[in-house]
Image (cartoon, rainbow, N blue to C red):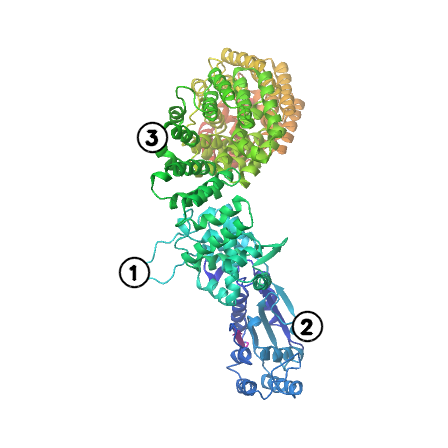
Amino acid sequence: MLTSRDDDVLAGRDHELGLLTGLLTTGHRRPAVGVLEGPPGIGKSRLLAELRRTAAGSGRPVAPARARATGDGRPVPYGLLLDALWDTGARSLLEAFADQAEAGTGTGTGKGTGTGNADGPEHGHRQHRKLREALAGAPPVLLLDDVQWADRESLLLLDRLVASPPTGRFTVVLACRSGGCPPWLTRTLADADAEWIELAPLGPAAIARLVPGAAPERLRLLARASGGNPRYLRALTEPSAGPCTGPPPELPTELPTDLLAGLAAGDPRVLGPQPAAPATADWQPGPELRGELATLAERTRTVLRAAAVAGPEFDPALVAAVAELPIGAVAGALDELAGHGLLAPAGGRHRFTRPLPAAALYRLAGSAWRAGAHRRAADHLDRCGAPLAEWAGQAAYATPGADRGLLARLTAAAGTVLDPEPVTSARWLRAVLAALPERADCAELRTEATLLLGRALTLTGRLDEATAALGPLLSGPAPDRERAAGPVALAERLRGRTDRVYGLLDRDGGGRARDQLQLARLDVMNGRTERSLHRIEAAVRRDDSAGTRLTAHGLTSLAAIGQGAVPAARRALDAAERLADSLDARGQLRALAALPELGWAGVLLERRQRTAERIERGIALAERHQHHYVIPQLHAVRAALLLMSGPLDAARAAADRALELARELGATETLAIAAALRLRALAWQGGPAAAGPALELLLGLPEPPTAVWRAVVRHAAVEASVVCGQPPSAAEAARLLNLGDGRWRDPMPAHGHDLMAAVHAAEGNTALVARHVELAGRAARSAGLPAAGAVVSLASARLLRVRGEQDRATALARRAADGLAASGFVVRAGMAQLVAAEIAAEHGDRSGYEGATDAARRLFGRAGAHALLARAELPWRAGRCAAEASGARTVPDAAVPPGRPAPPEGPSLSAREHEIADLTAQGLTNQAIAARLFLSVRTVESHLTSVYRKLGISGRAAVARALDPVRHG
């Protein structure tokens, strides 16, 4: 709901109000004049009201008035000034002027043609002198609103007052619609150096103030649909209804997003009652909007209503057919509406620039008029030989009572636009199904419309609605069941119900090619690569179309990666990319379903740049055509690509978007993946404080239904647990990562084995570290990927470090960092440099330590990994503690910063306690220590309490002195 008009409608108008308020302090020697211009509802009256309060508060008399539109009648002469100066000494004078004008005894214009007698100009001068004398000394602040409706006599007299003002401080502020001030008055105002203020539409920040709590996407749509106009914003956020008795109707608190998007796209018809938008049934334009419409002449309203029927962009001839008016009359009315800023010419056609007034007229028209108007539009388009889709856009609104032939034709049209415009297709199909009679001769058409509707709803992400629509067909005849099963299976897969997918599609005889590819996708993601390849071959034998081959190539690439056949995976991905680049526009839309697999294959095969460009294009295409079902998956791929090289802000934003959209769709398959990617970005950016809540969110979600994605999510959870200072035991980590048997489960197995090597190194288990180095090497040799080889070097460095071979360990860690950086894994390269820094510190190599931390800082800074950057900034003194400790055991590089110390002789401080005590002695706060060591503040406080007790001190001020004997024996 919009916030209070009295308080916040001035949001975004501080500058304009300041200019107007400044006029109140001037005007001693010449008039202080202001002019507010803008379209209806932009906030001119509200600014004048605020200025009136300010002027009254300063003790100045105020004379406000508003001119009124009188339709075709003539306004009362001097009516505007009479209203303004009613409570002043000028009232009787103006009444006399008005009586003379009504009697035709003279008003004298002096400007163009007037209504008075021959002595007009001289008479006008006499009137001006008399009024100026009446106002002399302490003239009021004149605030005149809607002067475009004002009587000519008032404006003529005002013109003279501005040119030759009364004595005393004279301030006048006029408000009018854009272009509504007469040219002769405009010139006089310019000569008086008037402060001319053209009110612009409200910006995003002001709209956010007016609609607090709205989601960013909804604010964007509200801005476009309202054009930044406060009146229209109120109409869209404050549902209203006509008079009624009894309890108020249940009104929607806000328009559905898809309707708001339609209005933002310029289509006034979306707010009219229709089968696809039942939530609009109670929407009614409020009194403000009705009042604006009432100022239009009757014929102009008729043309605007007919233009609303025509749609977002229209031909004047179509409007003439709908309005049943001559084309000349329609053209004149369209010019008038363009002058009001409601329309704009567009290459011989017109389009709506402010569709809400037209939408209000369309909504207020009776249902019978709307149906008849759309029939006239459809008939006109038919006579003109318009494209089928253009005809269908009108016929869909005229389906009540339509014959079977029209409904069959509309169904065919819905099928032609299903891929490029699934939302439109669904709306047409709903209209068909609502109008089709329950007769035997309509059963086949009903089935066809239902099947198309299920597909359209699936594409737009309305998974529950798609399943509900197609459900009855699953128990029908075999051909109908087979066609319905595919969209239902896609919806079930996205919602994580893989058993249901197998039940729907895994039938004897194999089913359709598209169904076989859905099953092959599940097999790949469950590690059943041989079976998936058999299904892929069967699908291509059944259907050799470009779409089938593209999906087959992408899945083949993933299956080959799972088998360790990287050259074959590359060849398949090459074929997929060539085919994707050759597709026409419709083919690209149909290929969106295959794009996530191509994206993940590109991630795993380290084709970062090419894959990122393809995914960006895919997201733009899916959003433009509202293929919502695939957008969360594409944002997840985008997040994974950005995690490789940064910036991490963008990676987190992509993961957030994937998470948000997956929730909206109920897409369980993508939900946990997005949360895992988000967790990794937050851990690297914000450390434990950010990773902790993100880890809780991930662990609270259902696990992905397929083995590969479960492995990815568990890997992220193990990493984050280490980051949060609560690493799992080696046994628990091995169980979660499922790497012990060396079988393919994780898409990046070398990384998993390196993580396990780090966990075992923390426990000092050299044999198990060596085992995972060996397994990492096997995975890397099988993959043949540069990054995988670099990860093996890093795992080997961990092993050599545990064995005490410091020089070789340092060299391998640096080699790993170089390899990861060359492959685009910027953050991972920085983490490898941190391992090199730890080893150098343990070996007493200050130069090596500082060189490695410098390299890490550059890499983390480039990616925006702020928490890791803080670890790389630990000074030599902290790192050197590890060299002074005896028997130190290495811990995972994601968990502990360089130089984790072991307990020295003396008071039995643990390694972690000694490290925290040393940083405390350097003057770091608990918060700073927590950030550097990837711990929570509470954990730091707990360790410090133990330090105080063991050292026999009472506070941090004594830590440095108490540590000296501990360090030096």
Q: Nearer the viewer, residue 657 or 407?
A: 407
The residue that label 1 is drawn on is: 246
Within 10 angstroms of label 3, few (less than 14), some, or many (20 or more) residues?
Answer: few
Q: Nearer the viewer, residue 456 or 769?
A: 456
Dot 2 amino acid type: Arg
The residue that label 3 is drawn on is: 475
Q: Quadrant of the N terminus?
A: bottom left
Which circle's residue, 1 or 2, is located before the other in the chain?
2
x and y, in percent, of residue 280 in the image: 41, 52
Within 10 angstroms of label 1, few (less than 14), some, or many (20 or more) residues?
Answer: few
In the rendered structure, are the residues bearing label 3 and label 1 in contact, judged by CB atoms less than 8 Å apart?
no
Instruction: Check residue 151 in the rendering and tell me which mark sits there, or answer none.
Output: none
Dot 3 amino acid type: Ser
x and y, in percent, of residue 704 in the image: 43, 27
Q: Is disc 3 placed on a helix, strand or loop?
A: helix
Q: Is disc 1 placed on a helix, strand or loop?
A: loop
The residue depicted at 55 percent of the width and 81 percent of the height is: 77
**In which quadrant of the rendered view does residue 13 lie?**
bottom right
The residue that label 2 is drawn on is: 187
Q: Nearer the viewer, residue 735 or 963?
A: 735
Dot 1 amino acid type: Gly
The residue depicted at 56 percent of the width and 81 percent of the height is: 78
Residue that lies at the very extreme toward the left in this rendered image: 246
Residue 558 visible here: yes
Q: CA distance from mark 3 to mark 1?
A: 45 Å
Span colored in magenta: 60-67
**Would you place residue 921 above or below residue 802 in this image?**
below
**Would you place residue 494 above or below residue 892 in this image?**
below
x and y, in percent, of residue 535 in the image: 47, 19
